Amino acid sequence: MALIEKAVGEVAFAASLALVAIGVYGLTSTNNMLRMLLSLEVIFNGILLGIVAYLSFQPIMASIVAILLVAVVAAEVIVTMAILAGLYRQVRTFETTGLEEEGV
Amino acid sequence: MALVDYYPYMAALLTGAMLVTAYYVVRHKDLVYSSIALALLGSMTAAFVALLGFGLVAAFIVVVYVGAAVMFIIMSISMLGGGGPEARSEAPGILAASGILAGLAVVLAATGLFKAYAHPGAYTVTEVAQVLLSKYSPVLWVLVVALAATLLEAIAVARRGE
């Protein structure tokens, strides 16, 4: 039983690492701000999985941290999308390049 | 074999599906499909968290994260569009991802964090709520104020220029 638990935990940490790496790849290989936001969300999923697996020896603490984390990320998504919508209204693009020339 | 014996296989299967979906999120040309894939990824993360023994957190992820945050992203991108074709430069991304992956793997292996998981014992929603409302009540209040400010800020930013 303990071996099975350890195996599941190791898979969880490996999945967490791989998700963070894929998210970083997406974040650094594009100049589209919407794609960057989606990549950040992939990183968040990896971090969340890692934190829950790491804090599993304190289940109540892990639950509270995860709940607060999800709530904060939901707020972050709303603010980011509002900023991007406002920016898009001005420059009609989501690209990061050339924003200085547009006077943003 | 009991159901528990299949957990490692289920975890591995889930991990494979999550990685494919994550790659789809960062690579697909159409951002609407990418954001829908993000919703799938969030659901699979919730399934994995449930497999780890945290059913309450899994439910919260599905309801708040997938149901509200990611749905908000999907609707916003559907309304705004993707902003046209995007320029991609693969080399920095692959380099950064490889560096992060190798660095974190070394840290996790060196500190023994890979072995840190222990299946949580039984706990109830009531216990979590009691701790949240007593020991962590200041955090909860700060979060409530921050979320209210966030909502106002988002409305203000979105309405600017009308």
Image (tube, helix red, strand yellow):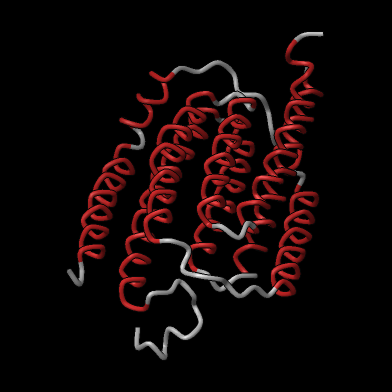
The residue furthest left is B162
Left or right of A86: which side holds A4? right
Residue A53: x %, y % from top left: 63, 36
Residue visible at 42% across and 25% down?
A: B128
The residue furthest top is B1
Left or right of A85: which side holds B12? right
Residue visible at 51% across and 82% down?
A: A97
Residue B91 vertical placement versus A101 (above, below): above
Residue B89: x %, y % from top left: 68, 75
Q: Nearer the viewer, residue B118 or B98?
A: B98
Q: Quadrant of residue A86?
A: bottom left
Q: Quadrant of the N terminus of chain B?
A: top right
Left or right of B159: which side holds A21? right
The residue furthest bottom is A101
Residue visible at 41% across and 91% down?
A: A101
Residue A18 vertical placement versus B7 (above, below): below
Residue visible at 31% across and 72% down?
A: A89
Residue B54 vertical placement versus B34 (above, below): above
Q: Nearer the viewer, residue A69 or B18?
A: B18
Q: Quadrant of the C terminus of chain B?
A: bottom left
Residue B97: x %, y % from top left: 72, 63
Residue A92: x %, y % from top left: 38, 75
Left or right of B161: which side holds A35? right
Q: Quadrant of residue B6?
A: top right
Tally of numbered tags: 0
